[in-house]
Amino acid sequence: MLQNLETLARDARSWPFEQARNLLAHVLKKRLSDAERNAAKLLIDAGKADEALATFEALQRPVVLETGYGPSGLPHMGTFGEVARTTMVRNAFRALTGDHWPTRLIAFSDDMDGLRKVPEGIPNPEMLAEDLHKPLTVVRDPFGTHDSFGAHNNARLRAFLDGFGFDYEFLSSTEQYRSGRFDQTLLTLLERFDAVQAIMLPTLGEERRATYSPFLPISPLTGHVLQVPTLARNVEKGTIVFDDPAGGRTELPVTGGHVKLQWKPDWAMRWTALDVDYEMSGKDLIESVRESGKICRALGGVPPEGFNFELFLDVEGKKISKSKGNGLTMEEWLRYGTPESLSWYMFQSPKSAKSLHFNVIPRAIDDYLASIEAWKTQEPAKRIDNAVWSIHAGSPPEHASPVSFALLLNLVSVANASDKAQLWAYMAKYLPEATP
């Protein structure tokens, strides 16, 4: 059965399997010589991924997939979409390799970023205003439940992901910087500072170029994340020199959490230090992926495989913006639809811009239910491309709701039902197996 699943995965046409095959090719190329890669590919194509892993030690390291989260705000629809889609690719990769290859899904929180503005709708905004420019894990928690604002939002992220049953490993940027996990790559960047600048400066405006540095020192006096030029570097000592607005000329090590990186160099550094093999991102970040990939190579790393998904549109066809509030929140979707219907929506055509508003929920639910029904009679080659394979990792539920959303809407209209009891009493005559 396993071998049959691997064969089906090699021929599957849905996008998670296309991405899984791209990921497999990427990892083989990244870790093996040409001759080794050809030999490993023959074994994997023959359904012998376990033998390939046993033969080539470089393949025994886990394949790392990553998603990123900015904890200045709460998890939202985009957060769910990125983790859900990456999980679909991970499941497809496991099927493609007979589930012999270890994988990790990292949910990475950029919680060392400085707080740039006070978010709307947050209690105690004056507290946040006093802590502006400090790392999010230093900013006090306005909700009073955690050690910091970053810790509060990280907890919300983990509860959010846990609530959907995602299998992931949480990593905090602050913890990684302070623990020394990034130290070696940071020292490499210090050594190759000029190469990184040569990549970044042409992408910036004239004024920004004059002061840009990939290093953002954290002031030992104010705790602020500083956007200041690097005046001098000491590669042997592993330090940079800069002007601290609060204390004049200052020298700090680039290791141990004394500095963080600008976000594009930071992304590249993370790919290198964590040996990330796969990360997807929105279409608006295509240029950022390109520049970060160049920096990753300059640091001696290999940029991950990935693809760029399209963004969501509102009911008027305009790009959804958190600041404008013209989108649909997770809470709004889940009030009317199931998590599985939202996963179904995320599965569909990720490279096409899609409308995200109330009107899409009933259709998404009914199409998900129809996919469950279709699964029951489909042949294996069709099943693996059915969205419910990716949503449920190959084990969708046997039974779906006997009532469609469209039927409910019609019944409410026809029966002129003003309360739930009246509606369910009406429905029980025709569908006694249905429950509220």
Image: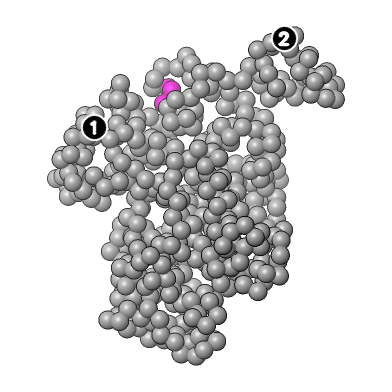
Q: Residue at x 46, y 64 (%)?
A: 174
| Residues packed near mark 2 inside 10 Å, few (<14), some (14 to 19) or many (20 plus) | few
Secondary element at image label 2 = loop
Residue 183 in the figure: left or right of residue 383: left
Mark 1: amino acid: Asp
Residue 213 in the figure: left or right of residue 73: left
Residue 212 position (above or below residue 429): below
Q: Nearer the viewer, residue 88 or 118?
A: 118
Q: Earlier in the sequence, mark 2 or mark 1?
A: 1
Q: Point out the image quarter for the N terminus.
A: top left
Residue 346, position in %: x, y? 54, 38
Res. 99 visible in picture: yes
Mark 2: amino acid: Tyr
Q: Residue at x 35, y 37 (%)?
A: 93
Q: Which residue is mark 1?
A: 45
What secondary structure characterizes most of the magenta part? loop
Eye-nearest disc, 2 or 1? 2
The span shown in magenta is: 382-386
Q: Which mark is residue 430?
A: 2
Residue 12, position in %: x, y? 38, 29
**Colour scheme of the picture:** one colour
Quadrant in which residue 265 is drawn: bottom left
Q: Residue at x 49, y 81 (%)?
A: 220
Residue 282, position in %: x, y? 51, 51
Secondary element at image label 1 = helix
| Mark 2 → mark 1, Cα distance in angstroms | 51 Å
